[in-house]
Image: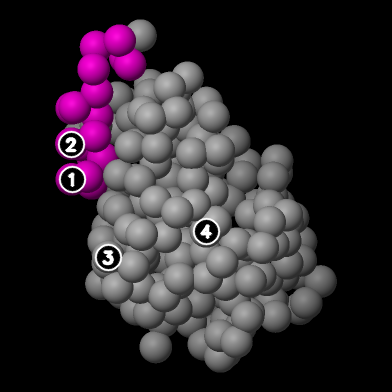
Amino acid sequence: MVTVVIPFAGVEGKTRLHASQRTRRDLSLAMLGDVLSAAVAVGRVRVVTADPDGAALAQDVGVELVGDPGGGQGAAVEAALAGVEPGAILIVNADVPCVLPADLRALLAATPVGGIALVEALDGTTNALSIPAAEVFAPLYGRDSAARFRARAETLGLEAVSAALPNLIDDVDTIDDLRRLHLRLGPRSQTGLANLPAEALR
């Protein structure tokens, strides 16, 4: 059984998306919904969040909910991995609204036996990880995290590969990102973008 972990920071995790908290909330939840739709088609899903709206969406979809202990994305993922048995584990950011089930399956297929695969964003951060066991993970997120995850795998004696999967490479930090990706966005994010008031697009 594949386990998919999705950390969701909520509105506060997307401060560059828009000045309006309501707009950030609506778009962040839309992107989370699209990522969830892909994830539930692949395996067991755990959403880790302290955001009440994100938690409600996770419960509506019927996935497992883990409380975010605070301390950043790495600590959140560690909490969600607690008790997960060794096996195929995907850790996927909540801001990749173009992702499809086929992309997650391709990431799994690219993972070396006993090793890790990752999808690196254009800025060197990490949008998705595939690991063989929870203990392989370390909280290494942030600038240039993809390089750190590869270095950790090397330290553990594990093979690490980078997977070139555009729908996972393309994350969303700004309204301009959404506009650029609009033809590939999942349905919730497409609707969210289409329903933005004109002033939100300025």
Task: Give the residue displayed 29% in from the left and 24% down from the top.
Answer: 179
Instruction: Give residue 122's position: percent from left, percent from top.
Output: 53, 37
Dots 1 and 2: beta carbons under 8 Å? yes
Q: Which residue is mark 2?
A: 191
Q: Report the magenta residues as a range.
A: 184-201
Dots 3 and 4: beta carbons under 8 Å? no
Q: Which residue is mark 3?
A: 60
**What residue type is disc 2 on?**
Thr
Instruction: Give residue 135's position: percent from left, percent from top.
Output: 70, 80
Q: Which corner quadrant of the image does residue 65 belong to?
A: bottom left
- Mark 4 to mark 2: distance in Å? 23 Å
Residue 167, can we see it?
no
Numbered disc 3: secondary structure:
helix
Using the image, determine if residue 157 lies above or below residue 74.
below
Sequence-first disc among 3 and 4? 4
Numbered disc 2: secondary structure:
helix
